[in-house]
Image: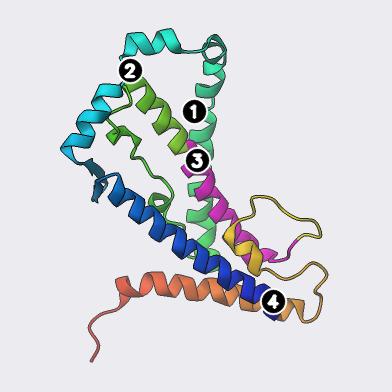
Amino acid sequence: MNDRIRQLLLQITALEDELNEALREQGSRLRYQIEGRRVVFEQTIREAHQRVKLGVFRWFLTVRPQNYLTMPFIYGMALPMLAFDLSVNLYQSICFPVYGISRVKRRDYFVMDHQHLAYLNIIEKSHCLYCSYAVGLLAFASEVVARTEQYFCPIKHARRVYGAHPRYERFLEYGEAEDFHGKLEAYRAQLARERSEVEQPQCGGPSR
């Protein structure tokens, strides 16, 4: 990785930190707090949300006809997604210990908090939870695949890849053949270090 790319990656990390800080400030401005897995709004904000909520009957009257027509196809994806979820979990449970890779924590990728929004009726909340599950599942599976790719083939493509996982930018350049297998072992060693960092709090006892 050349100095220019390393510099750009550092800038991206700094911008991500700045974005997270801006999002925290926005939360303060909208007057909500995160308590465990719950998001709690101030009473005045919650009352304002309640006033703009559409009742279920009125909501049904506002739904576009094409949305009714496509709904069976949207919710018909539930079973394939559940099967995919199970398959990804089974794969990493069996293979990652063999490879020396830490398992991806599923709970880190599934954020279900739209049900705390008082301006959504029960059907809208159900839609939001379904979408949140789908988005979380794809992000979770992407990280599982990313760790697998880093173990077997940490090489970039010749063409630009849209929506690439975060690990991709640190992979070897396309055509970078010099000491490929030595560098591959370094990528695998990094995965092993990540695993040891995750497991150390569980295995480590008091030092003497």
Compared with 122, 132 (above or below) is: below
**Magenta segment range?**
134-156
Q: Mark 1 points at which residue?
A: 78
Q: Distance between the residues labelled 4 and 3?
A: 33 Å
Q: Which residue is drawn at 73% across and 65% down?
A: 155
Report the front residue among 202 and 154: 154
The answer to the question of whether label 3 and label 1 lie on touching residues, with beta carbons closer than 8 A, is no
Q: Kindly indicate the quadrant of the structure image that contains residue 167.
A: bottom right
Q: Which amino acid does label 1 sit on?
A: Ala
Q: For the residue labelled by badge 1, is the local secondary structure a helix, a strand or a loop?
A: helix
Q: Mark 2 points at which residue?
A: 54
Q: Earlier in the sequence, mark 2 or mark 4?
A: 4
Q: Which of marks 1 and 4 is nearer the N terminus?
A: 4
Q: For the residue labelled by badge 3, is the local secondary structure a helix, a strand or a loop?
A: helix
Q: Which of marks 3 and 2 is nearer the N terminus?
A: 2
Q: Name the residue under label 4.
A: 4
Q: Earlier in the sequence, mark 3 or mark 1?
A: 1
Measured as percent of width and height from the top left, residue 50 is found at 24, 25
Q: Which amino acid does label 2 sit on?
A: Leu
